[in-house]
Image: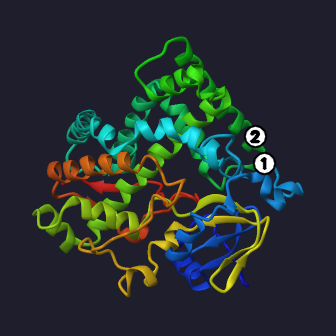
Amino acid sequence: MTRIALDPFVADLDGESAALRAAGPLAEVELPGGVHCYAVTHHAAARQLLTDSRVVKDINVWGAWQRGEIPMDWPLIGLANPGRSMLTVDGADHRRLRTLVAQALTVKRVERLRAGIEALTTASLDRLAALPKGEKVDLKAEFAYPLPMNVISELMGVDGADHPRLKELFEKFFSTQTPPGEVPQMMADLGTLFTKIVDAKRAEPGDDLTSALIAASEDGDHLTNEEIVNTLQLIIAAGHETTISLIVNAVVALQTHPEQRKQVLSGELPWENVIEETLRWNTPTSHVLIRFATEDVTVGDKVLPKGEALIVSFGALGRDEEQYGPTAGEFDATRSPNRHIAFGHGPHVCPGAALSRLEAGVALPALYERFPELELAVPASELRNKPIVTQNDLFDLPVELG
């Protein structure tokens, strides 16, 4: 099996995803830093593995981890071993840790956040409208980033004063370019910051999910302080990064497909179609780290060996012709059905999917209603990917608002 090295600079995600699919459904890959693992690259195989009880989240199953081959200053260590939370356990422990979060993020409960999301969106658009006419604007920094960060912070009870520090630390957390010598301190700083937030909520509870997690631990649900801190970090990280990319990628898709943009803006196509097709075609999450095989698992004509690590290559899955047909590589907002798994599948499916869809469903139509003449300020070919192997993210999104 030929090993494919994932590019730490993410210079050509589409090309890399195509190579992974061609090597699939189970491809042997090398993560930045020389760490070996396998990637599931076809839709059907991913659905199989994501529900297979022999593929678990316990890092102690990983042979390379047991043998001491994974250094603690590996740039992706925070994604491979982020601490005990619903992301890193299975079975009863997973259900216990996930229950409160899932209850807070049901479709019905998330819908109650709509008015607040609409208000935040309007405020962001008002700030954009106040900028001098003709000025280039980084739509990611000025619109796509603040909305999900403010929403998830309000949900979790995180003070806006912590946002600059969170942004700085998460930039290092996700990047493959963080110098190894800075990784341990970055991880320690994240732990310190989120511990501070939890301690503040323990002293003065509020109407937020962090306070609810603390109260549950005191009422007999037996969440440890470490589990609460790590759950808070997980939700803040996943709750804003994915939605930023979804909004940015949807704008790029519409700007590079003018006929479909016209259909959406005229009401001929619903915004829901744009969101779902963006999630499939240019998924916010390119690769998700990391699961481990407790025994040999057959995948097609290949085997995921016992003790090996598995990543899920969502960028490759989304354009699998076996699932989506010969037009899988095209953006088509009329596509139906569109049964992608961009938010995962099985027990660990993302509990924040409804919230991300709602934020994008509010933000995108409001953006184009206010600025229907919006245009990219540079050719799409000049947009730059950030060096993040897990997030399909751009450095910036320069636009002219019109």
Report whether 378 appears left or right of 220: left
Q: Position of residue 151 (x, y in %)?
A: 37, 36
Look at the picture and state if 331 lies above or below 294. below
* Label annotation for residue 73: 1
Q: Earlier in the sequence, mark 2 or mark 1?
A: 1
Q: Amino acid at mark 1?
A: Asp
Q: Quadrant of the C terminus?
A: bottom left
User: What's the residue type where badge 2 is placed?
Assistant: Pro
Residue shown at 33% from the left, 45% from the top? 107
Up-down: is 101 above or below 391?
above
Residue at (45%, 84%) from the top-left corner? 322
Q: Residue at x 30, y 41 (%)?
A: 108
Q: Residues within 10 Å of mark 2 (few under 14, many from 20)?
A: some
| Element carrying mark 1 | loop
Residue 226 lies, with reference to residue 320, above or below; the image says above
Residue 72 image offset from top left, x and y in percent:
80, 47
Q: Is residue 75 above or below residue 125?
A: below
Inter-mark Cα distance, 2 to 1:
6 Å
| Residue position for label 2 | 184
Circles 2 and 1 in contact, beta carbons < 8 Å: yes
* Quadrant housing residue 52: bottom right
Q: Secondary structure at mark 2?
A: helix
